[in-house]
Amino acid sequence: MIGVAVLGAGRIGKIHARNAAANPRCRLVAVADPVAELARSLAAEVGCEASTDPKGTASRADVDAIVIGTPTDSHIEFMLGGVRQGKAVLCEKPIGLDIKTVDAAVAEASKPGARVMIAFNRRFDPSAAALKRAIAAGEIGNLRQVVITSRDPGPPPLSYIATSGGIFHDMMIHDFDMARWLLDEEPIEVSAMASCLVDPAIGKAGDHDTLMVIMRTASGRQCHINNCRQAVYGYDQRFEVFGSAGMLLNDNLRPSTIRRYNAGETEAREPLLNFFLERYADAYRLELDAFLQAVESKSAMPVTVRDGRQALRLADAALESAETGRSVRV
Amino acid sequence: MIGVAVLGAGRIGKIHARNAAANPRCRLVAVADPVAELARSLAAEVGCEASTDPKGTASRADVDAIVIGTPTDSHIEFMLGGVRQGKAVLCEKPIGLDIKTVDAAVAEASKPGARVMIAFNRRFDPSAAALKRAIAAGEIGNLRQVVITSRDPGPPPLSYIATSGGIFHDMMIHDFDMARWLLDEEPIEVSAMASCLVDPAIGKAGDHDTLMVIMRTASGRQCHINNCRQAVYGYDQRFEVFGSAGMLLNDNLRPSTIRRYNAGETEAREPLLNFFLERYADAYRLELDAFLQAVESKSAMPVTVRDGRQALRLADAALESAETGRSVRV
Amino acid sequence: MIGVAVLGAGRIGKIHARNAAANPRCRLVAVADPVAELARSLAAEVGCEASTDPKGTASRADVDAIVIGTPTDSHIEFMLGGVRQGKAVLCEKPIGLDIKTVDAAVAEASKPGARVMIAFNRRFDPSAAALKRAIAAGEIGNLRQVVITSRDPGPPPLSYIATSGGIFHDMMIHDFDMARWLLDEEPIEVSAMASCLVDPAIGKAGDHDTLMVIMRTASGRQCHINNCRQAVYGYDQRFEVFGSAGMLLNDNLRPSTIRRYNAGETEAREPLLNFFLERYADAYRLELDAFLQAVESKSAMPVTVRDGRQALRLADAALESAETGRSVRV
Amino acid sequence: MIGVAVLGAGRIGKIHARNAAANPRCRLVAVADPVAELARSLAAEVGCEASTDPKGTASRADVDAIVIGTPTDSHIEFMLGGVRQGKAVLCEKPIGLDIKTVDAAVAEASKPGARVMIAFNRRFDPSAAALKRAIAAGEIGNLRQVVITSRDPGPPPLSYIATSGGIFHDMMIHDFDMARWLLDEEPIEVSAMASCLVDPAIGKAGDHDTLMVIMRTASGRQCHINNCRQAVYGYDQRFEVFGSAGMLLNDNLRPSTIRRYNAGETEAREPLLNFFLERYADAYRLELDAFLQAVESKSAMPVTVRDGRQALRLADAALESAETGRSVRV
């Protein structure tokens, strides 16, 4: 059985620790976080050891695989540390925010024997995965256009925005990965427009809150992504893929199947699931399982460091396009 | 071109007169109603003659077909009058309220050469017709169950209820016809339950306002109908047909395709179309056209007097069942 | 922590054992089934003791609560055995098939101190529970009509049908409980029609496969239930509640949110979830949790033995009505 | 009553002539087309005079208003001819294909007393109009993003493409008008990507068949449009508007409300309406009525020549962006 350590006991670390505790493929050895109280309470909940030393925990002989849920600026350090010690690594996105540093890390993490998976969890959402299988099975023929809508229920605190790397790198990076995965071909040109329509304070902090991007691949496939930091009706995660033989739409999940009819409206459904923890609960669970399965079977990681790098590259290009008003070649 | 006279210039007469005026298969000769003002204003609108003498109008030599939209107690008189003079007749439902009188009229109106169609307009609703065609094409295999939901937006005035013949004969009679048409086999047993839940005054007037019925045919096909005189969310007209190879659902029409998302709800659609004039506008138009086409081509009437008689028989049986608490054999 | 034993290691016992193993409110002590292999393999999977002696297992001092998933004819014996030893009991439906025997058992299981819950799991389905809360919150005003559609994906083996007690007691009994729960008032009159349209062999075995029922309560509320042993499009579990202020529809769950558009059709969704194990997986989990919560907090059982008895009484009445062609007073 | 002449008896001329014949606000005087047979057969159908001289017909004293449905290169000539003779003019889009010529024509057609409406019929689609009213009523608060999907069921003949002015000017021009109308603010920056994925012959003819565009306004509102010349599932016309207080989706119309359930799929609906003649039948009818109403009441034209000019300007900008790979300022 695979021994697992979770580094970071914050919001994301908690998800991974709980999923690891419940997954029969692995044994959760320890949870490590410099904030002792966070590590202790999470470890108590999931029934494993607590540590304030992530580095030491990652090095333990009974740890075969590490899950990195620490702040972004420590991702590369823990990732390469794990690789050097022969550990399998599941690393949260983004790998980092500077493309040069990331490229160097990707080079090392791509060497023979290195076992790293980047945590683009949305690929493991059951509906997204079913849709991807349908594309692969030829249901829509040759893919032509992808349209991705991705809006958060509300903006994060300004303090978070200041350190987030910006909306292109923090929020749209998920959609860039989704776009690459669905397009099945690398985008070579990116054009972006960015506005600040939700909260002027976000603009003052140097960021945007409302985005539109278009991209195309060498063969002419096209993709549109829109983002907004606030949708009052909830966490809006939809996409459509359109091809020569048909179209597939992937709608939002809802907490129940109830449809309401009253004097004002008909067919009304309940608000959407609150945010990513609720919306992608299954995806996180299945993501960890896919990682453990790859570790067990020594098969290829389902999401590679190169995937993490390419999403970053597209975010860089989109930001440049929004700032210069020009399309950017990738 | 077929010369048409419309008898009755009330709510239903207006629909038929407007449709006749716009239909290229016929020429609308006259509109007749004992209430001179009704006849005059409708005739002016549609551009034909006005008359206060329905009987005389129906006898005119330039009238080939009459449309009877007068009060129920005069239906048989005008229908048989038309038949005797060799006119084609489109007669509003119900033929009458007394099964013996109706049976005698049906006998005469079924003689060779008699040309009478009963106006069960819902059969001509485009969605209902498409669904019926799908059944006939074998899409659901052998039919097993039909479920019909039919609720009005609000009760009629008490004065109307007093002369309506009761909810089984006034409202559910449409659904009995729809049931027979969809089942494609005669019901042989009827069981009904009737309540007064909308307005106690309806109960005091000797009628019910909320109904449930089940029926079965000789081969074992089953049908459920529910009715209510008031649905605050609007005129609710749905049905489903279920068979060995699948199911078809026929949903309500809506005034637009807009779906609303806001802080409280998602997918909310606009209220349903107000009532039968709006909901079945197309059906009335297509019904008249089907009648005229049968007249033109001398082919069989698409809805016969026997259909009108059978719906009445089922309404009688359902009322008896509701009153006795027993299933009734038909 | 509550010590739990699961009696019966068949299809239902497996569900309960797995849920108990994963529920933090309890400790799964043992699984007992006379068929040693069934008990052993299930116990190995969930990590508890195996036994071939249900009675002895139920009597263990470290067992506080028993879950009865044995064949129907042993329900009462284990239920009363548990009650006499002061154990809390979660008993699968139906309690039994003979109303007199059941009434005697209910009397004993209702005495002060007895702690029995009947496993009508559908009440714990998240969508059903949300809908029930909406009714209780007054969203639809005064309830008038309930329509329940409940169709299985395919008939059970004939061998099962022979011992099932018949479709009214085996299948519709779930819907009778749902009807009572939603109506919030006891039905006093039942009328039923039963056909054999799926497989003549079912009729030869003395059972029916296609049912329609209507019921009414003392205040005039009405309910329709339809059942069929086979729906080729999958396990069809829908209901609607209609009242003075609106309507709530509860639709089927689907495995994904994908909607397909191709040359033939639009909006097409994937087949429904296969059968009750998949459709009600959440409901079983939440049902066990509700039982354990009631045991922990010594509060009232959320589904009582009387609920189990009343559903049986309605099934008896419906069968009688189908056989006699008369409505039956309850 | 307004005397109307329809110039052009092709596909579009037929729609306008039929609607004019049925509209009680006007009298259809004549239909004119240089192809005598086209004019004659249409005139016979709608019951008016036929002419092979559009110019002469437009000048008749009994003609108050002209509807221009001739080929694009004659639009300006007939439009200005009508204006000079004091006729009200409903002119099909586009006004022309050369922005300078169009600007000169717009200048003349905007002089006091000139009465010209451009036929952007989609604004009169009942669902689009209801959605626009909802925005105006503040339902979605401050508008942030508009997403327009517009795909044809199949490409036109290559011969048509050669003279169409290209997909940006022939097809997306409708969406540019829709975008301006929904955004309620002029776009100031346009970025476009164009591919040839449907048929290489279209590319050889110098055109594209698959487009994606993003635009933004001065205040930061954003709009995405996607186009494709071929969608095998039918004519796909959807849009969504998203704002600070909610979102409105406008879905496709379908020929019936039937939902199908079978062994393979559930909720399947019929194919979409075939193409613009079917999809926008109501819109054409209401458009003509809005024009006639403006003529009658001497109120402002609901769609102005400036609207026609601005859509052309955006099409020019989008084409330039697609060719240069740069965003274009408008």
Image (cartoon, coloured by chain):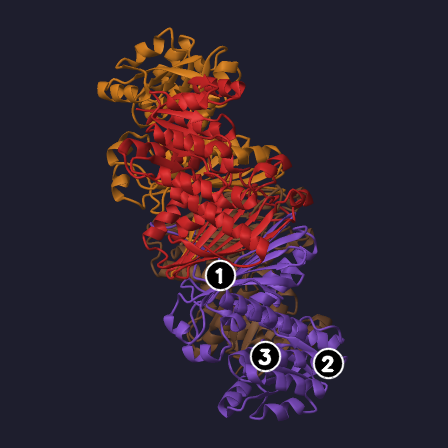
Chain colours: A red, B brown, C orange, D purple
Kindly report the distance in space between the C-alpha atoms of the residues bearing marks 1 and 3.
33 Å
Mark 2 crowdedness (10 Å alpha carbons): few <14, some 14-19, many ≥20: some
Q: Which residue is mark 3?
A: D96
Q: Earlier in the sequence, mark 1 or mark 2?
A: 2
* Mark 1 and mark 2 on one chain: yes
> What residue do we see at 41% from left, 45% from top?
A128
What kind of element bears circle 2? loop
Work out whether mark 3 precedes mark 2 in sequence or the reverse, and give the earlier one: 3
Front residue of C227 and B126: B126
Q: Is residue B309 above or below residue B116?
A: above
Q: Of the residues shown, which amino acid type is indicated by label 3?
A: Gly
Which mark's residue is nearer the viewer, 1 or 2? Answer: 2
Front position among marks 1 and 3:
3
Give the residue at x 61% y 55%. B164
- In the image, C75 versus A322, the foreground residue is A322
Give the SS element for disc 3. Answer: loop
Q: Is residue B49 visible?
A: no
Q: CA distance from mark 1 to mark 2?
A: 39 Å
Q: Position of residue B78 (x, y in %)?
A: 57, 70
Where residue D254 is drawn, which disc sits there?
1
Residue C178 visible from this viewpoint: yes
In the rendered image, residue D283, in percent from the top left (x then y), is placed at 59, 69
Task: Estimate how packed mark 1 is, as few (under 14), some (14 to 19) or many (20 or more) residues with alpha carbons within 10 Å.
Answer: some
In front here: B168 or A179? Answer: A179
Amino acid type indicated by mark 1: Arg
**Element at label 1:** loop
**Chain letter of disc 2?**
D
Q: Which residue is mark 2?
A: D114
Q: Of the residues under marks 1 and 3, which one precedes in the sequence? A: 3
Q: Position of residue A164 (x, y in %)?
A: 56, 38
Q: Amino acid at mark 2?
A: Ala
